[in-house]
Image (cartoon, rainbow, N blue to C red):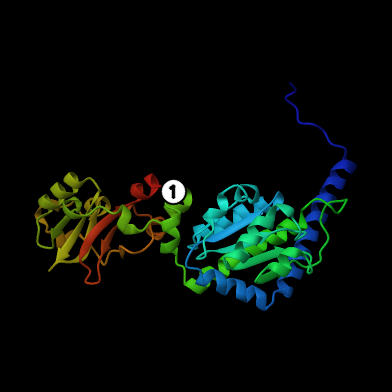
Amino acid sequence: MSDTAPVFDINSQTAVLATGARVLRTEGEALLLFAGSLDENFVRAVELIHACTGRVILSGMGKSGHIARKIAATLASTGTPSFFVHPAEASHGDLGMITPDDICIVLSNSGETSELSDILGHTRRFGIPLIGVASRPGSTLLTTADVPLLLPNAPEACAIGMAPTTSTTMTLALGDALAVAVMEKKGFQPTDFKVFHPGGKLGAQLLTVSALMHKGDDLPLIGEGAPMSEALLVMTAKSFGVVGVCNGGALTGIITDGDLRRHMDGLMTKRAADVMHRGPRTIAAGHLAVEALGVMNDRKITCLFVVDETKTPVGLIHIHDCLRAGVA
């Protein structure tokens, strides 16, 4: 097995790059054409999905089926219950998964895919709203659908003009457009998004400070009049390298290892108020942990006290908490 990479002829490389660029331009131009052709049927489709009290059922055969699965996943992850039903399985019992409370979005580039006939018949029999997506205006799918969404006449990107390329890209983008429009109509927020994305990097990015902060007896807190001997004991016991200083319950200052070094001369004769840094940077519990991490990185500090509206400390978040949770 050779350890060297294959050497390509420069003319061959140029041809490959030209092909790649041509495909991207062809599909990009089709998307721009599609964006300019959206009409009232797109609005009707968004309103139908938004008003659905059941689930949005996606179906399609072949490449359209793969696109349908992705659209169903996007809708589900953005707050619209949705799943994919395979047309062949639908004909063998899975039609029972589609109820009158649902709506169906059926994809077929030609609009004449025979395997979809049972799903189309089921929607008509039980009065289930049907959104059809196809590229032929007089096709069976679009004439049957309650809301027909017509793909614009754009060439496929492959050299023979037959492999589903441009058409599948447009259908995929249409699904994204529907999902985002429904999201905005619902007022979907990052906190809602986190409910459906609790794991992985995305879930970590949506964690709030309250989910990571230390609280209760773990907080290193003393009063302004406390002797520095007490401050040192609390700092050591709590192991955050910092102690918060309070007056009447509100956080008024903070003592760090750096403050100790700056006040070494006669340190043990001083009170917390003599050594503390006043007006420390804090954060609210409802903020995202990634915001807290940004503040800590910007200020070159390792922790932040979490306070409520009265400036009372309710928690402490350490940079290590963010790193362990995968926020960084």
Q: Nearer the viewer, residue 225 or 119?
A: 119
Relative to 289, say whether 40 is above or below.
below
In this orientation, does residue 177 appear? Answer: no
* Residue at the spot of label 1: 199
Dot 1: element: loop
In the rendered image, residue 287, in percent from the top left (x then y), is placed at 36, 63
Residue furthest out toward the top: 1
Q: Looking at the image, which is closer to me, 318 or 274? A: 318
Type of amino acid at the residue the image marks with label 1 = Gly
Position of 40 with respect to 209 (left or right) is right
**Residue lying at 16% horizontally and 45% vertically, measured from the top left:** 237
Give the image quarter of residue 221: bottom left
Q: Which image quadrant: the N terminus?
A: top right
Question: Crowding near pointer 1: few (<14 within 10 Å), some, many (20+)?
Answer: few
Q: Is residue 15 left or right of residue 326?
A: right
User: Residue 305 versus residue 274: which sits nearer the camera?
Assistant: 305
